[in-house]
Amino acid sequence: MRSLSLDQLRTLQTVVETGGFTAASRRLHLSQSAVSTQVQELEERLGVRLVERLGKKAYATAAGREVIARAQRIADETDDIVAATRRFRDGWVGRVQVGTGLTALMYLLPPVLKKIRAEHPGIELLVRNITTRGIVDAVLQNAIDLGVITLPIEEPQLRVTPLREERLVAILPQTMRDSPREVTPEFVADQSLILEPGAIQGLVLDWLSASAPAPRPSMVIGTVEAIKAIVAAGLGISIVPETAVAKSGRDLVVRPLSPPLGRTLALIEHRNKPEDAALTIVRDAILAGAK
């Protein structure tokens, strides 16, 4: 059987909707004979009667109703195709999904995202806040296109591009008496330690264990802003990226670590990821914004 004609299916629907061939011809801007021919050819192709007349009105047969129900789904899919391609015609460049930790999302990426939105409105940019491990897994599974993570990471299928080095610093409550000028692992071991889960927690615990038995964090809090509020309330101290406290309030004291500790932010993507214009634009914007 040859492929069904979309025009014939639409004509059949219109005949039934309007109740006759004459009304359908007016709506479709076709001659009545052309409408009749299309319906007849469709009936011959399917081998069943699709329309029957009762008086002056045309009705769908049982088979015709089945065809029309399925034809409507085909019409809906056709409309989706037109809408999808219209985005390209009207300047749509593509969609890029980026995964990032919350700290980078709050303190590094906002100006980058703003610049992309202003200069490339045709890019549909989706940003997800997930853990480093979640970002790595999502990139490997092609669920996201780019990830901003804290190193180290060992995955041979990933292309890793370092973005920037960031110092980690200690934050203490302003009310703490005799706070040291530098914070050492020995000092931290005697405090209630509040950490953010994920890669930074691992870096801090490794730093602590190199000089003293690493203490268990008294709290693990999901956002740096919440950690800052808890520290300001006098419930403990924390170690966070320096960028997170660049504009800290008077209720926090920021101290360097001794020995120093830092983290490396990196951009990751799958080595086999196909290149396209939108991905290149977003990648280049993140690389430039991290300098």
Image (cartoon, helix red, strand yellow):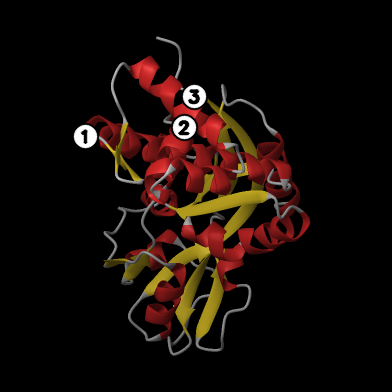
Residue closest to the eye, 168 or 190: 168
Residue 54 is left or right of residue 118, and the answer is left
Residue closest to the eye, 9 or 124: 9
* Above-or-below relation of 106 to 63: below
Instruction: Specify which label sits upstream in the sequence, 1 or 3.
Output: 3
Label 1 is placed on what type of residue? Ala
Q: Residue at x 44, y 51 (%)?
A: 207
Q: CA distance from mark 3 to mark 2?
A: 37 Å
Label 2 is placed on what type of residue? Asn
* Residue 265 image offset from top left, x and y in percent: 58, 47
> Nearer the viewer's eye, disc 3 or disc 2?
3
What residue is disc 3 on? Answer: 5
* Residue 43 image offset from top left, x and y in percent: 36, 22
> Nearer the viewer's eye, disc 1 or disc 2?
1
Residue 67 showing in the rendered view? yes
Q: CA distance from mark 1 to mark 2?
A: 46 Å
* Residue 217 image offset from top left, x and y in percent: 29, 62
| Mark identifier at residue 142 | 2
What residue is disc 1 on? Answer: 62
Instruction: Specify which label sits upstream in the sequence, 3 or 2.
Output: 3
Instruction: Specify which label sits upstream in the sequence, 1 or 2.
Output: 1
Task: Identify the element where label 3 is drawn.
Answer: loop
Q: CA distance from mark 1 to mark 3?
A: 20 Å
Task: Identify the element where label 1 is drawn.
Answer: helix
Task: Identify the element where label 2 is drawn.
Answer: loop
